[in-house]
Amino acid sequence: MTDFEVFCTYLSLKSHFNKKSYDYFKYQGRVTAKKDSFHKRKDRFFFERLSRSKTKEQIIDYFVANFIESPDPSKVWVGDLKTTGEANYNNWLKRKHGLEYIFTEDLKKLIEERHLLDALASEKNRHPLILRLFLRKEICLETFIIIDDILSFTKKLSDDDIIWKGLKLLVEKYKPFLHYDKTKFVKIIKMQCLTKN
């Protein structure tokens, strides 16, 4: 990839994670950007460095990792990426490579005190346990998304809830980038639930 293509990838993924109407996959990463404007940017060397050090797939993963790690993806700017970008990317890679183990450990935390379906249900005036554990960073975003993908528990959450509203966009936008063996993870859930009983 050229430095300009890396910049366009950054812009398209930024739009993907911040705008409900923009879909990186639907629009195939296309954005409106001009080379002349790009070459006037003071941070263009950052994109040049990325273009030389990473493959296209790694560049996409790098930006995805940084957008999902941010408390507010709309505020991710190049200065942040220069300082914490590589650390966020490496943390994401560790989770990706250890996903099966991390998922199993997160699931154990989730069903430690109650049945899985109870942990996914909203309680009176309280968020479901799974959401509370995620917000406290006791389980990872990938675990949250995989369990939702398999059991569709977020359909019961209210879109009026301000906490869920902010997280819902992140979950929806990250989900297509999260690749896992669904059959294997369904088996992990069944095994953990049987072990608990």
Image: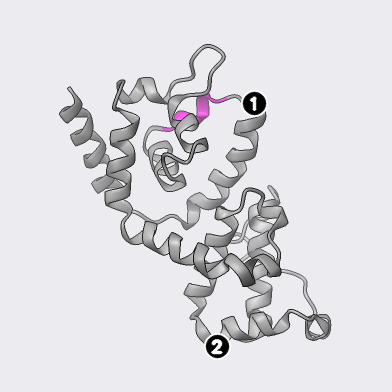
Name the quadrant of the C terminus.
top left
Please, what is the three-letter code of the amino acid marked with disc 2? Arg
Residue 22: say if magenta. Answer: no
Please indicate whether residue 172 sits to the left or right of residue 40 in the image.
left
Q: Quadrant of the N terminus?
A: bottom right
Q: Position of residue 96 (x, y in %)?
A: 37, 59
Q: Residue 74 in the image: state x and y as whole percent.
A: 71, 54
The magenta stretch is 152-157
Q: Are marks 2 and 1 in contact (CB under 8 Å)?
A: no
Q: Residue at x 51, y 84 (%)?
A: 53
Q: Position of residue 180 (x, y in %)?
A: 34, 54
**Corner quadrant of residue 15:** bottom right
| Label 2: which secondary element | helix
Q: Residue at x 48, y 74 (%)?
A: 58
Q: What residue is shown with label 1?
A: 161
Which residue is farthest top? 124
* Residue 132, x across and y down, in percent: 49, 30
Kind of residue indicated by mark 1: Asp
Question: Which sits in the foreground, 29 or 49?
Answer: 49
Which residue is disc 2 drawn over? 52
**Is residue 1 visible in the rendered structure shown here?**
no
Identify the residue shown where x is 53% and y is 18%: 126
* Element marked by disc 1: loop
How busy is the neighbourhood of tag 2: few (under 14 within 10 Å), some, or many (20 plus)? Answer: few
